[in-house]
Structure formats: structure tokens, C-alpha cells
């Protein structure tokens, strides 16, 4: 009886990068640079190239900042998912958990403001195009992905012990030549946090989610979903930063729903953002 086979395989990665932060004009900061990445793996053609990097930040006023960025990347294996290369440019993330060998480019613009160091708000728009390998038996193909992100946020200090936060996040993910073609997700979390100098803290968060999923075959109404979740937590911070004790509840009222994660383009299975069942757990973090 034969149950198993053994196949030889290899992966090779070569990379390097150079960044420069320039402050030639007062109140303006420019990031320019490039990286070189080369990735080779069994049954996959060599993927390599130079990736330009550009970022710009302008302090229009003491409480108003404009950010812009454009860059390209090649996703290669990371040792223990860590890297010493800068992970963001002008506040825009450039490292994602893509499938190894994915080529991508991202461009974005953002505006951040604050008032009296008590109220913080901002808007951000970005577009990301990627091309990732897929294996079909011994053959491979490359699939295009497009991601558009629209993000707004507002944080405020209500009292020395109370903080309120709200966000609006619209994510549009599309793959024109795949079975799962489009995912549009709107999420609006609103939360309030309490912090006591003696170490006690608490959180209450309400999140509205609306999602539409389109699949191949014009099933445009499949996967439309709306739901509202309540999450809460209470905990205690040990003196001298020795650790944190907490009791947390996700989906407190046990809402049932269907939600499609965008983990179809990631290199490994990820924890769902929203879980369609009540989850209560305790957490202990100790620092020595």
C-alpha cells in the first residue's frame, strides 16, 4: 500500500534596499528609495526586479498634515514574518501577507488633523494592484487583484479617563478572472474606552458591517449581508508594567451572519475579523 510521496523543493530569496529621507524645504519631508527583490521557488519562474519608493509629507499647519505615497513591492518569504526594511512609507503600509512571489504597487493620499491634542481626525484613500501566482497541478498562473481603500477616523478625549473612537472603512477587493470576483465591505466601529490610574480599564465597541460578494456566473445578490456586533472587555494593568489581565467578549449578543474574509490572497490562513458566534475568553500577559 502506498500512501505518501516525497517531492524535492527549494526557495531562494535575495533582497536589498536603500531609503533616503530628505528635508530640503521646511515643513516638508520626502522619502525616496528603491528595493531589489529576487524570489525563486520550485515550479515557479524567477521573479525579480527593482521597486521604486516615493513618499511625501507636508505639514500645512501645526495641526494639519498632507501625506502621499507611491511604491512597488515583491513579496518574498520572511524569516519568522519579520523584516528590518521599513514597513510603511508616509504612513502607508507596504508589507502585506500576500502569497510569496506577488508583485504589487500602491498609491495613496491622506490628510490628518488634530485640535488641542484632544481631537484627532483624518481621511485616507489608497489603491493597490497586485499580481500573485497560483498553482494548478504542476502548472502556474498569475491572477490580478485590485484593492481600493477609503478610510476616515475620528478620535477624541472626553475626559482624562475616557476616550471615544469612530471609523468608517470601505474596502473594495476585486479579481476579474476568478470564481470569487468582488468583495465590498463597509465597516463602522464606534467605541468608548475607560482608563483608571490604578490600572483598571474597560472597553465597549459597536460595529456595523455591510458586505456584498459577487461570484462568477452573475450571482450578484449572493452574499449580501448586514449585521451589528457588540464587543466588550474589562481588565487590569499590573503595577510597573508587569503585565495585563483581561476578560473579553466578542459578538456579545451572539449574532449569526455570513462574512467573507479577504484571505483568499494571503499566504496562510488568518483569523476572521468577525466571528458569527459569541466568544468569551480571558487573557494574561506577563512581562519579566
Image (tube, rainbow, N blue to C red):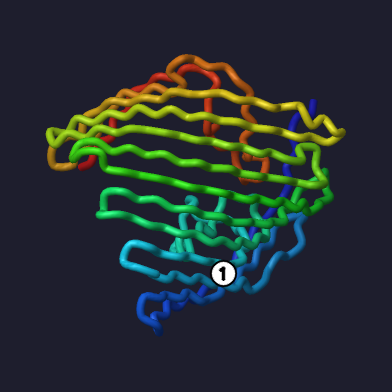
Residue 100: image quadrant is bottom right
114 or 50, which lies in front?
Answer: 114
Furthest residue in direction right, as rendered: 217
119 or 105, which lies in front?
Answer: 119
Q: Is residue 182 above or below residue 133?
A: above
Residue 69: image quadrant is bottom right
Quarter in which the C terminus is drawn = top left
264 or 6, which lies in front?
Answer: 264
Q: Is residue 154 left or right of residue 152?
A: left
**Which residue is at a point 40% across and 84% down the rendered structure image?**
24
Give the x, y percent position of residue 129: 68, 57
Give the x, y percent position of residue 104: 65, 60
**Which residue is at a point 75% across and 26% down the rendered structure image?**
222
Q: Of helix, strand and loop, which one carries label 1? A: strand
**Which residue is at a point 61% across and 37% down the rendered structure image?**
185
**Which residue is at a point 44% across and 63% down the rendered structure image?**
84
Quarter in which the N terminus is drawn = top right
The answer to whether residue 262 is visible is yes
Give the x, y percent position of residue 134: 76, 48
Q: Is residue 71 above or below residue 3?
A: below
Mark 1 lies on residue = 15
Amino acid at each position: 500500500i502506498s500512501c505518501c510521496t516525497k517531492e524535492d523543493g527549494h526557495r531562494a530569496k535575495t533582497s536589498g534596499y536603500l531609503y533616503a529621507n530628505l528635508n530640503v524645504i521646511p515643513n516638508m519631508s520626502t522619502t525616496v528609495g528603491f528595493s531589489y527583490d529576487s524570489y525563486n521557488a520550485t515550479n515557479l519562474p524567477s521573479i525579480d526586479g527593482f521597486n521604486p519608493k516615493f513618499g511625501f509629507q507636508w505639514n500645512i499647519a501645526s495641526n494639519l498634515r498632507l501625506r502621499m505615497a507611491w511604491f512597488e513591492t515583491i513579496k518574498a518569504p520572511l524569516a519568522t514574518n519579520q523584516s528590518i526594511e521599513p514597513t510603511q512609507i508616509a504612513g502607508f503600509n507596504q508589507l502585506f501577507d500576500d502569497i510569496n512571489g506577488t508583485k504589487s504597487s500602491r498609491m495613496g493620499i491622506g490628510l490628518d488633523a488634530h485640535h488641542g491634542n484632544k481631537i484627532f481626525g483624518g481621511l485616507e484613500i489608497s489603491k493597490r494592484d497586485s499580481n500573485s501566482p497560483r498553482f494548478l497541478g504542476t502548472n502556474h498562473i498569475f491572477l490580478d487583484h485590485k484593492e481600493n481603500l477609503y478610510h476616515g477616523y475620528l478620535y477624541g478625549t472626553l475626559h482624562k479617563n475616557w476616550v471615544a473612537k469612530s471609523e468608517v472603512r470601505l474596502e473594495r477587493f476585486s479579481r476579474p478572472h476568478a470564481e470569487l470576483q468582488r468583495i465590498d465591505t463597509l465597516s463602522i466601529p464606534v467605541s468608548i474606552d475607560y482608563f483608571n490610574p490604578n490600572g483598571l480599564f474597560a472597553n465597549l465597541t459597536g460595529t456595523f458591517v455591510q458586505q456584498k460578494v459577487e461570484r462568477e456566473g452573475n450571482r450578484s445578490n449572493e452574499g449580501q449581508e448586514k449585521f451589528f456586533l457588540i464587543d466588550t472587555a474589562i481588565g487590569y494593568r499590573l503595577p510597573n508594567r508587569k503585565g495585563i489581565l483581561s476578560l473579553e467578549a466578542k459578538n456579545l449578543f451572539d449574532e449569526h451572519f455570513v462574512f467573507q474574509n479577504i484571505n483568499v490572497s494571503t499566504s496562510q490562513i488568518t483569523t476572521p475579523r468577525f466571528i458569527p458566534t459569541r466568544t468569551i475568553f480571558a487573557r494574561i500577559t506577563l512581562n519579566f
